[in-house]
């Protein structure tokens, strides 16, 4: 069984990232289903304890971003990995196509609204990266964003470069304010994705998740992979790296992601606030006094 080292999946911007050279499948980090569940439970406890300390300290928050092609395992991983985290200190925001209100603002506006506060783990199921992924594959959608034509670059290559810069500045700003970002790209093989889509269609409880529009979108697979590759190369930094997760094996995927989150949370320079021992004793006496009066 392989040893899980998170640096193996971390990409900080150099050398150039290539999706074609990135594996979608690794030897498992678990021996069987029971071992997988046991490891995830241990990681969930670590995450919960580290998040509890982050919450008590009150200086840091954490944003976790999931990006992937359809059926790569975003929902199942989020559901399984975070099930042990205190729900009062956990926020999830799924993002679909922008609505009319979103389009009346700048392209980052709706994501600002969903950012976590200090002490909270925030999860974006898809994110502002759709603005340089789906938008790049379908540039005709730019017209819906109501950007003054005079402010649009003459060529789309310049536009995407500008947006990459906007995103990097946005993430640097969050990092400098105590909100590090974990960015996960779930790398799944097209054939494996096809098997999962067929499995959805064969399950009456999941058929609603897939439509003709989804299959039309699948025709753009090479365009999306190129957009992902360019986006990761342009936005991976030392402070806010990407993590490229082999995702053909969902159990492996979950263990890798949970390990990364646990280790990053544990690495934050946070601590539980201390109370003066005399003050603690004074409060204890106050509680006992209240109880004696009520009996």
Image (tube, rainbow, N blue to C red):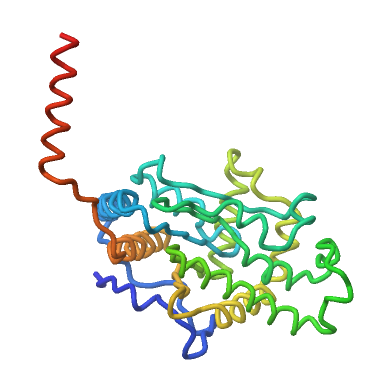
Is 256 drawn above or below residue 234 in the view shown? above
Q: Is 233 displayed left or right of 51 in the figure?
A: right
Is residue 188 visible in the rendered structure shown here?
Answer: no
Q: Residue at x 61, y 81 (%)?
A: 230
Front-most of residues 90 and 186 = 90
Q: Is 118 displayed left or right of 107 in the figure?
A: left
Is 13 drawn above or below residue 110 in the view shown? below
Position in image of residue 115 (x %, y %): 54, 54
Label total for image: 0
**Within the image, what quadrant is residue 148 found in?**
bottom right
Q: Residue at x 13, y 33 (%)?
A: 282
**Within the image, what quadrant is residue 111 found in?**
bottom right
Q: Is 206 displayed left or right of 122 in the figure?
A: right
Front-most of residues 239 and 212 = 239
Is 98 drawn above or below residue 158 in the view shown? above
Is 222 drawn above or below residue 182 in the view shown? below
Front-most of residues 245 and 213 = 245
Q: Residue at x 84, y 63 (%)?
A: 146
Quarter of the image with the C terminus is top left
Position in image of residue 237 (x %, y %): 48, 80
Is residue 164 visible in the rendered structure shown here?
Answer: yes
Q: Residue at x 53, y 85 (%)?
A: 18
Q: Is 256 displayed left or right of 160 in the figure?
A: left
């Amino acid at each position: 069984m392989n040893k899980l080292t998170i640096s193996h999946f971390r990409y900080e911007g150099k050398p150039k990232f290539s999706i074609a050279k990135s594996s979608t499948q690794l030897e498992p980090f678990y021996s069987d289903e029971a071992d997988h569940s046991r490891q995830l439970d241990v990681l969930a406890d670590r995450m919960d304890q580290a998040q509890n300390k982050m919450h008590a300290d009150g200086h840091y928050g954490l944003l976790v971003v999931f990006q992937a092609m359809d059926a790569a395992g975003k929902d199942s991983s989020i559901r399984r990995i975070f099930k042990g985290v205190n729900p009062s200190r956990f926020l999830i925001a799924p993002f679909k196509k922008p609505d009319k209100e979103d389009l009346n603002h700048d392209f980052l506006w709706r994501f600002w609204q969903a950012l976590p506060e200090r002490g909270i783990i925030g999860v974006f199921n898809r994110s502002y990266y759709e603005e340089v992924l789906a938008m790049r594959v379908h540039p005709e959608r730019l017209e819906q964003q109501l950007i003054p034509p005079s402010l649009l670059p003459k060529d789309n290559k310049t536009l995407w470069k500008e947006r990459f810069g906007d995103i990097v500045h946005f993430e640097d700003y969050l990092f400098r304010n105590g909100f590090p970002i974990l960015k996960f790209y779930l790398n799944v093989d097209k054939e494996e994705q096809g098997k999962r889509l067929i499995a959805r269609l064969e399950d009456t409880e999941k058929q609603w998740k897939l439509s003709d529009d989804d299959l039309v979108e699948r025709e753009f697979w090479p365009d999306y992979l190129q957009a992902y590759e360019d986006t990761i190369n342009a936005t991976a930094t030392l402070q806010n790296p990407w993590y490229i997760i082999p995702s053909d094996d969902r159990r492996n995927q979950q263990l890798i992601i949970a390990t990364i989150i646990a280790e990053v949370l544990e690495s934050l320079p946070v601590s539980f606030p201390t109370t003066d021992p005399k003050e603690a004793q004074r409060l204890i006496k106050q509680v006992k006094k209240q109880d004696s009066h009520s009996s």
